[in-house]
Image (spheres, coloured by chain):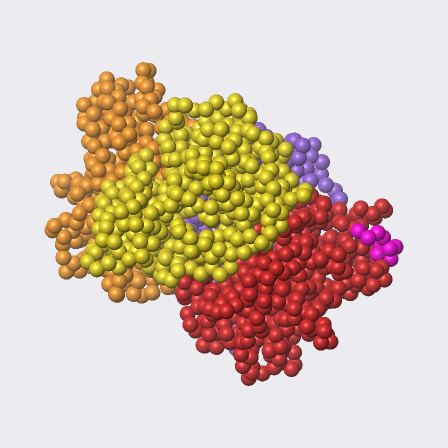
Chain colours: A purple, B orange, C yellow, D red
Amino acid sequence: MTIARTDLPDLADGLLQAFTDVRSLTERLAGLLSPEDQTAQSMPDASPTKWHRAHTTWFFEEFLLSPTAGYTAYDPTFRYLFNSYYDQVGPRHPRSERGLVTRPGTVEIERYRCHVDTAMADLVRSGGDQREAELVRLGLHHEQQHQELLVMDAKHLLSKHPFGPALVPAPADEPEDATAPAPLGWRGIEGGLVEVGHDAREHGFAYDNESPRHRVWLEPFEVADRPVTNADWRAFIADGGYDRPELWLSDGWATVKQDGWRAPGYWRERDGEWWVFTCSGERPLRAAEPVCHVSFYEADAYARWAGARLPTEAEWEHAAAGLDRLAQAGGTPGRTPTGWTALDPLRMHPELARAGVLGQVWEWTSSAYLPYPGFSPPEGAVGEYNGKFMCDQHVLRGSSCVTPAGHQRLTYRNFFPAGARWAFSGLRLARDAGR
Amino acid sequence: MTIARTDLPDLADGLLQAFTDVRSLTERLAGLLSPEDQTAQSMPDASPTKWHRAHTTWFFEEFLLSPTAGYTAYDPTFRYLFNSYYDQVGPRHPRSERGLVTRPGTVEIERYRCHVDTAMADLVRSGGDQREAELVRLGLHHEQQHQELLVMDAKHLLSKHPFGPALVPAPADEPEDATAPAPLGWRGIEGGLVEVGHDAREHGFAYDNESPRHRVWLEPFEVADRPVTNADWRAFIADGGYDRPELWLSDGWATVKQDGWRAPGYWRERDGEWWVFTCSGERPLRAAEPVCHVSFYEADAYARWAGARLPTEAEWEHAAAGLDRLAQAGGTPGRTPTGWTALDPLRMHPELARAGVLGQVWEWTSSAYLPYPGFSPPEGAVGEYNGKFMCDQHVLRGSSCVTPAGHQRLTYRNFFPAGARWAFSGLRLARDAGR
Amino acid sequence: MTIARTDLPDLADGLLQAFTDVRSLTERLAGLLSPEDQTAQSMPDASPTKWHRAHTTWFFEEFLLSPTAGYTAYDPTFRYLFNSYYDQVGPRHPRSERGLVTRPGTVEIERYRCHVDTAMADLVRSGGDQREAELVRLGLHHEQQHQELLVMDAKHLLSKHPFGPALVPAPADEPEDATAPAPLGWRGIEGGLVEVGHDAREHGFAYDNESPRHRVWLEPFEVADRPVTNADWRAFIADGGYDRPELWLSDGWATVKQDGWRAPGYWRERDGEWWVFTCSGERPLRAAEPVCHVSFYEADAYARWAGARLPTEAEWEHAAAGLDRLAQAGGTPGRTPTGWTALDPLRMHPELARAGVLGQVWEWTSSAYLPYPGFSPPEGAVGEYNGKFMCDQHVLRGSSCVTPAGHQRLTYRNFFPAGARWAFSGLRLARDAGR
Amino acid sequence: MTIARTDLPDLADGLLQAFTDVRSLTERLAGLLSPEDQTAQSMPDASPTKWHRAHTTWFFEEFLLSPTAGYTAYDPTFRYLFNSYYDQVGPRHPRSERGLVTRPGTVEIERYRCHVDTAMADLVRSGGDQREAELVRLGLHHEQQHQELLVMDAKHLLSKHPFGPALVPAPADEPEDATAPAPLGWRGIEGGLVEVGHDAREHGFAYDNESPRHRVWLEPFEVADRPVTNADWRAFIADGGYDRPELWLSDGWATVKQDGWRAPGYWRERDGEWWVFTCSGERPLRAAEPVCHVSFYEADAYARWAGARLPTEAEWEHAAAGLDRLAQAGGTPGRTPTGWTALDPLRMHPELARAGVLGQVWEWTSSAYLPYPGFSPPEGAVGEYNGKFMCDQHVLRGSSCVTPAGHQRLTYRNFFPAGARWAFSGLRLARDAGR
């Protein structure tokens, strides 16, 4: 459970390199998809790939280039087309109709990216002020976030295809599924009056919602030393997990009934065997891998079934911070050992699952996504980034195998609605001490 | 901001009297409504009056009488018809179709209540064990909760009638609206490591969700000395409150647009004047009364507009507890000065609004409705009472002018979804200290 | 297949008697239902009983009394509440919210009926002009139509109750189901240039949509001598009728899939036996009775399966007219032998089913409900009675066991959407001659 | 009002040429659209361009090649993906999700078309039997029908784009809008016992729904000598056409209210001027052009407002047949003077509008789409082509400016639901003689 801080630099030189790296990765990901793939929108919550490519570009144009003297917008209509949810920027195209905006096409969007990248390179090279550098960094973290969304959305789209095509080829060295998961261990944490959240005085980037660092009282608790695995989840199913209302939140049970849930997202049963749809298409489920694509409702029900609970986000962060210190002291690299070559947790090696290293699946916490005490968003449209979503969402911590390197952070607060399953989301159990 | 603890007794004698009192009040409330009124269901969230009458009766039959040797159920079909949401009891009629169950009618339900009341009187008189006494008390608090729902639902139904009929006649001594609301004052609270929640070792009833009492760290804060008033709200409207997305949570703004909100629930504008639909029909809005029938979204937006915020539920309880102690020391009666003769906050005297006494409107907090640390629901179906709703709901504290006397409690946690407006819900501002 | 013309008189004396008779029957039907039953609306297409009672009264008030000097409306709000669909009268309450208008209640509506009946008796006694007498007759036929709707809607409401209560007690002399249906016979009809529709020069009432009488060319055809029976329908089911898309219209097949149709409306299978919900509650299906509560989609699919087709409405009328002449020549009374004591075709004696007499079930035709050549509706709001519904509806001919005596007519055009099943609707087969 | 019979040949040589011509036209049309454009589905009723390309190809593969010994399907999954609605062929992909099938992409579909075209060329050259030749002709007419749908669907998609891109460039010689439409003239038609429908003994292709030729009785009537124009429609709007419920069918009025219709489809008002979205983007409305993109509801309401009515389809065909004979006798070429260079009626020259020539807009009739007397569909899946849609659809006659040359036919029966507006649909008035 170790998260490295591999932050993006803020010096001009380093920043330009970071800019180039992040922007390139988006294009490499998009390159896995045809113009047709990049156009479709598989549900209102998802966006077309080409929209992600344009929207992340628009972010730099809107917040950095447009205020700059002498800059000419690539196309004035893009301000309307590629604004996601910034009300203070102006009107925008309805989210649910992004799949109908077939123009600009992928080639035109490539040109748009080049136009903006050129102007951005000038701006970054010219040094700029501190605020600009911070906005560039925000824009890069924003783009990294969209890289993960891009993969999530593409996987969802491909899963809707009746013949399940692959986003990336399966690796040649696919592991066997012979290994059983490690037995679950518990790690005790003392609690007390602890501090969580991002410390603004510290070096390093964080989103506004991670601040301010503040005090929280924690009673002693224990946290599992590995995430819940597919093998665990099969036991839950076998024990009637999806048939026993007493395990579920009321809204969760209603969703189970309405949507006919019988297993995590992308699981498919055929002739008594479980298969799973991955970014490399369908393959047999592997017992030792962490369970993925479960909703908050399912995570909560599983924890209740297991006689445990989800950790709060403060518990999670406090426990992970301890490990992080240990890891740094011990000289372990502390890097999440996954990269963009592994686009799917279900392609992860079982050894990694056993290692208990974060970075395979996001982990649901029991916390509602709310402002930290003393939170206040930045002035202007950028302030809409996080705060206005602090209602009826649930916090996930850690990172996943499709989170870009450099985007993991101990204080990172990811969030989704309780029924969402298209993120790479799993869970880790916790329980009160002394049970 | 004072809440008395006027609890229901647990001795046999006193309990029987309490039983009779609570059960009678339900019938008196229902007596305001014709058989036709009692049948209709105005939205899926609301229930017909006659359903409330039968369901509260079923609660005693299911949890107390049915396990008793020798008891014969009044009608075995009622177990299906009048179970609200207890999955462990068995299948139940869909909530959204309660308005189609025209049989049993009101007379039959009256007979059902008599049948159960007779058997319950025997059971209570016979002494019973501690667990039974606790279930009776739970049943009575349950019925009190439904008394408030009954009024909320009836008001909603009558509001859907195009000619706005009254539930109760308007009082003869209607106050003038000459008085302006008192200016808003702030009260500073120190914070620190405080305790909140119900202490199980203390005498007195509480729902399971109010336990266990636990420690919370609070930074210093301030709380307003009166709720937000109609006059305040008109200023919010006049300043474009419903037209400025930057004031709103994202989901709240979407709801404003979709449902066309321009004012609180039951407000109606005609010829530039504001009218309000009350339990006595429509009348002009009164400036000094606390605003009522606002959603969490609106309360949150108002607080942002006012440069303040909503209190957390821990802040609210800690602040109110201090006042409670003061009130008790000073010998003030501490009783909420409202009763069932005042069925509508909008009929409250402005003096009361000025007094800052709780009990006029429920007050939204910023807290999501979540389990307290260490919470565990009781075994069996009764355990479904509260815990399974702890998801995407928001806590309100205090009580309203239609909360039955004896149902107020300092640690009481009421909850509704963020968009609900048919409860008698208002708000009180808070802010960080030192601003 | 005989329909008598048992028309309502147009002389003052006889008209008053007819007025009293028709108005009384409505009240006797409503008397089977409690105030609670009369309030509920089980689907947007159905209306509460008490609404039918008020709306039929409003019709007389609006079109006859309100234009009369000196008449005072019983309650001016009723013009809004009880207008069904007459745009030229003014705004009206939304149809789907009729179940929420709990006031006026049943007693108030009884008073309203008395008020209007008294004024109407004066008006009819005073003689009036020809147009008034025609409007009274229209109002009475309108009320008879609503009597059938009242029974349809009440049956539908009771069927939604989980324990299936009865509208009327089952008769003591329930027939056995020993008899098989009569074998199907065919009657040849010559065709040619025939006349159909109501002849305005003839004595007797007809709705505007039955005029003008006009010429139609018919090729020779054959028509079955009895309706399709429950036994026939079971053969259709056994042969995969609901599983074979090739038998169905495209929209019909989509409805079968979406609504999960496996049998006619109100049929219920338990342990391999078919039961049917009737106005006297549930009882075993009887083989020899005409099938009832089938949609146009089902009637059409059945006919295709049987190697036949539905008759056009012109074929139906032309064939029935011939039988009518025969019946009149032979001195048979020609009266439909059903009355209000038999509220359900499923309670009909099998002998009647064998007799091939119309009046048990409405019979779907293959004709879309369109204006006759030269059709023009009357001036004013009364002109909205029929014409504006001539789109995407399908014609049924004959009458049913719940059609009030005196409301049957050879030229009568009933109509419903293709998917409707809550009318007492069956079918009779036809086929081209020479097959 | 003249329709030429420019049929596809049935000899092997000619048939191969026809095959090549029709197949090429589809590709030329699709060539106007990028891969992104070809992927999106703008509403459930519309299909992506690339789906049209694949589905028309599948038709030949399924009905001609697959039954042929030695043929290897290009891709066995295409049988599922590109079946439109043929239940007897097997399961198929849900229509509303065609926009999510991003694979195969446009290049793959081009290869599919080549594969099938090669095999088809062999099959056609080899002579084949009569049934095969008929199926080829059916397939070509099917593809022509989809060519028109392709344009309709593409226009609809582009219209959903907020900046209204063009499918084809506007022509250089755009006409002025100086000319007023010709005054409306009436042509009297005698009626009597007439014959309509396709005569199977005659040379030439027709769909099954155009047969059998049969006798219909028509009373004398008159028909307008030109379609209703934009100028006419503006008078309808100015006279409150969209505000007067008495002009509308009940369902039509409900649609006007629900969808907020104030003008025909693709009309847009800005600063008091009417603009229209065409296949070449937006431009000012032209008074003399026939009104287009009106629904059946609107056509019916307009006719009522004009004191006229729509013709029945028998009247339309009988009237047009007379003109056709005249045209042929007079040596006029009788060809619809529009081709694929004119992709939009709104780009038509006003002279054409004045000439009263069919082929600019489909013309709504008052007839429901029902089987002709004696109609029976072919055996097998091909029998699903037309018959199963004969319910709640309305017949349009003639052809439009985007109907491919060779696809017009006097007896052609086009059909759409009453509320559809994305076809190139207008109207021509009729009235009873002697008015």
Query: Looking at the image, which residue is at 54% across and 60% down?
Result: D366
Instruction: Specify the segment rendered in magenta.
Output: D123-131
> Toward which corner of the image does residue A260 lie, by quadrant?
top right
Q: Dividing the image into 4 quarters, which one contains the C terminus of chain A?
A: top left
Pick the residue in front: D274 or A301: D274
Viewer-proximal residue, A151 or C240? C240
Q: Residue D227 is drawn in which quadrant?
A: bottom right
Q: At 46% from the left edge and 52% from the top edge, which residue is drawn? A: C198
Residue B420: x and y, percent? 35, 48
* Residue sitting at x 14%, y 49%: B171
Q: Position of residue C223 (x, y in %)?
A: 58, 41
Which residue appears at 65% of the width and 55% of the height?
D214
Residue C7 in view (yes/no): yes
* D413 over B373 or under it: above or below: below
Residue B216, percent from left and from top: 35, 42
Residue extending furthest toward the left: B173
Quadrant (top left, top right, bottom left, bottom right) of the N terminus of chain A = top right
Instruction: Tell whether position C200 is magenta.
Output: no
Q: Is residue A39 above or below residue C110?
A: below
- Magenta segment includes D130: yes
Q: Position of residue D77 (x, y in %)?
A: 72, 47
